[in-house]
Amino acid sequence: MLSATNLGKKYRKIWAIEPLSLQLSQGMYGLLGPNGAGKSTLMRLLAGLLAPSTGDATVNGISVRSGSKARLQIGYVPQTFRMYPQLSAREWLRHVAKLKGIGSCREQHCEADRLLSLVHLEKEADRPARTYSSGMVKRLGIAQALLGSPAVIIVDEPTTGLDPEERVRLRHVLSELAQSSVVLLSTHVLGDVESSCSDVIVLGNGKLHYNGRVAGLAQFAEGKLWEWEASHHEWQAIAQERLLAARKTSEGVLCRAIADTPPSPYATAAKPAMEDGYMALISSLSAAKGR
């Protein structure tokens, strides 16, 4: 169990994260929000890497700020993972295992081999890291975070810059971990959340705006999602920044937009999905901030 109670972070007079409370149990959770929403700050607070201004976070009842006992229960994977490029994955994991104080040399070797298999790096385990693809490096970052079998894994933007095949492979690794751990996944790729997570947390302007089932996000677009086919002439006059999608057809352009009222006389209400609800929520936050 990963819990946050009245957890917040303030810099001078500005809240980077306004006080919030969460309870996350076994499974995978998506953390969504636009740039500057406070996602990285929240993850660092939950991982015990940043001191809060108020409240606390706990792992199985132990404060994340209580020292090594709590830190060993948390695996944190930053967006950019760096290592010594001349070392192989096997050498790196054994090195980090030793730094973490994991058992004997034999236990360190066994743990490194187990994790290399888990993240599907066995075949490349003895190549120097400078020869790895970006996806392989990210999988190695996850393996490093798993040393010591932590109860909580916090991962920041793991699929950024990856090709579709590597993204799917990495999602499978995280899904396997979520069978026995709390996995918190921060991403801008809504498809990764929709395909892998059962629950989602949405931040905006440093505030918690949604914490619940992925499918529940669609409610924010109920009665606000419209579809219509615009002629080529009408297309020129549409405020395109309001569109969610536009696809050329033989007759014109098929448009999809979020709006309180029909954006065209020909627009009809559409059934929203998770992505539509997220975009409606973020649009409403941006509008409120601009007022």
Image (spheres, rainbow, N blue to C red):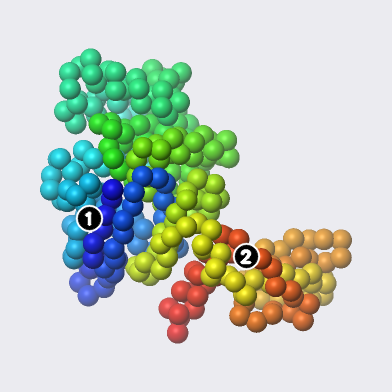
Q: Looking at the rendering, which quadrant does residue 257 occupy?
A: bottom right
Q: Nearer the viewer, residue 120 or 24?
A: 24
Residue 135 percent across, percent down from the top left? 47, 35
Residue 240 percent across, percent down from the top left? 66, 71
* Lower sequence index among marks 1 and 2: 1
Question: Which residue lies most toward the right here?
Answer: 250
The residue shown at (46%, 74%) is: 285
Q: Nearer the viewer, residue 123 or 103?
A: 103
Which element type, helix, strand or loop, lies under badge 1? Answer: strand
* Side (left or right) of 86 relative to 218: left
Say whether residue 237 is visible.
no
Marks 1 and 2, how far apart at CA: 35 Å
* Side (left or right) of 171 relative to 27: right
**Mark 1 neighbour density, 10 Å: few (under 14) some (14–19) many (20 or more):** many
Which element type, helix, strand or loop, lies under badge 2? Answer: loop
Say whether residue 276 is visible.
yes
Pointer 1 and pointer 2: residues touching (CB < 8 Å)?
Answer: no
Residue on which disc 1 sits: 57
Relative height, residue 185 to residue 289 (above, below) = above
Relative height, residue 43 to residue 161 (above, below) = below
Residue 258 percent across, percent down from the top left? 62, 72
Residue 28 percent across, percent down from the top left? 42, 46
The residue shown at (41%, 23%) is: 117
The image quadrant where one finds the C terminus is: bottom left
> In the rendered structure, which amino acid carries the disc numbered 1?
Ala
**Mark 2 neighbour density, 10 Å: few (under 14) some (14–19) many (20 or more):** many
Relative height, residue 241 to residue 180 (above, below) = below
* Side (left or right) of 197 relative to 208: right
> In the rendered structure, which amino acid carries the disc numbered 2?
Pro
Residue on which disc 2 sits: 272
